[in-house]
Image (cartoon, rainbow, N blue to C red):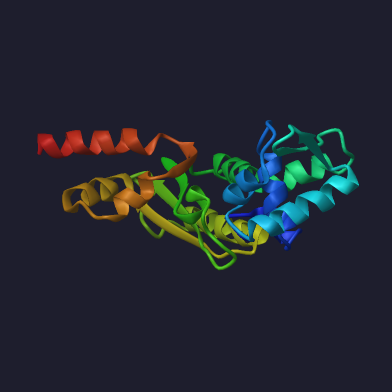
Amino acid sequence: MDLRTPISTVVPSLDGPVLQVLARSDEGLSGRQIHKLAGTGSVAGVRLVLQRLATTGLVHVDDLGNSLLYRLNRRHLVAPAVEFLADLRSTLVSRLADEISAWRIPAVHASLYGAIARGDGDLDSDVDLLLIRPDHLDAGDVLWEEQAGRLMQTVVDLTGNPAHVFELSRTELTDHLTTEEPILNDWMRPSIQLTGRPLASLLEEGTTQLALR
């Protein structure tokens, strides 16, 4: 799945990014605005797509005299499908959060980071996950490893993209603070929390623990 424009999985033409922009906006947008937000194609190409979609009734065109504004016709029979496809990232987040929340060994923290969190990936991008396990667990705990393994397979099943899991304990997370490793920034900026305690809170506690050593 194209992590930047998931709708392209089903609508691989320029229509996909255009529809994704329209589905995410409640206001009328000009062709140039849609082109800028879509981040692909040309202004002329986007306008051709909009004109074609307007003939189907899926897109409404408001003529303001000196400009045309386009918006998704949310009453159209196809509109719910477009809205669903445009919001596939949120669906992925919800599915993963539900699975991790049902784990027999709860995660201290679980989040998405990297391309999937930034929304700038592509067909070849990994879905990056951060998992923090309780300190009392060994790194090779069988049940924990089974849970993490199923999660990685779930990512592949849902998206077609490989999953990359960075898994560590709370203590190991604190140890990362001592070395100020750059990956800490990747985990934080931006990230999408799935379950457990906020990462910022865990890092703050870790900083306090280091100060007391």
Note whether residue 87 is visible: no
Would you place residue 150 above or below residue 134 in this image? Answer: below
Q: Nearer the viewer, residue 195 or 23?
A: 23
Q: Residue at x 62, y 51 (%)?
A: 35
The answer, for residue 149, to whether it is visible in the render is yes
Q: Is residue 32 left or right of residue 109?
A: right
Q: Residue furthest bottom?
A: 124
The residue depicted at 51 percent of the width and 55 percent of the height is 120
Q: In this orientation, which residue lies closer to the viewer: 180 or 60? A: 60
Residue closest to the eye, 101 or 59: 59
Quarter of the picture containing the N terminus is: bottom right
Q: Which residue is depicted at the point 24% across and 51% down? A: 176
Q: Is residue 60 left or right of residue 108?
A: right
Q: Residue furthest left?
A: 213
Residue 78 location, x and y as percent?
86, 44
- Image quadrant in which you'd find residue 94: top right
Q: Give me the residue at 36% from left, 44% from top.
A: 188
* Observer-nearest of 107 and 156: 156
State the image coordinates of residue 155 (x, y, percent, origin top left). Answer: 60, 57
Location of the C terminus by quadrant is: top left
For this view, does 204 lie left or right of residue 14?
A: left
The image position of residue 182, as x and y in percent, is 27, 55
Marker count (numbered): 0
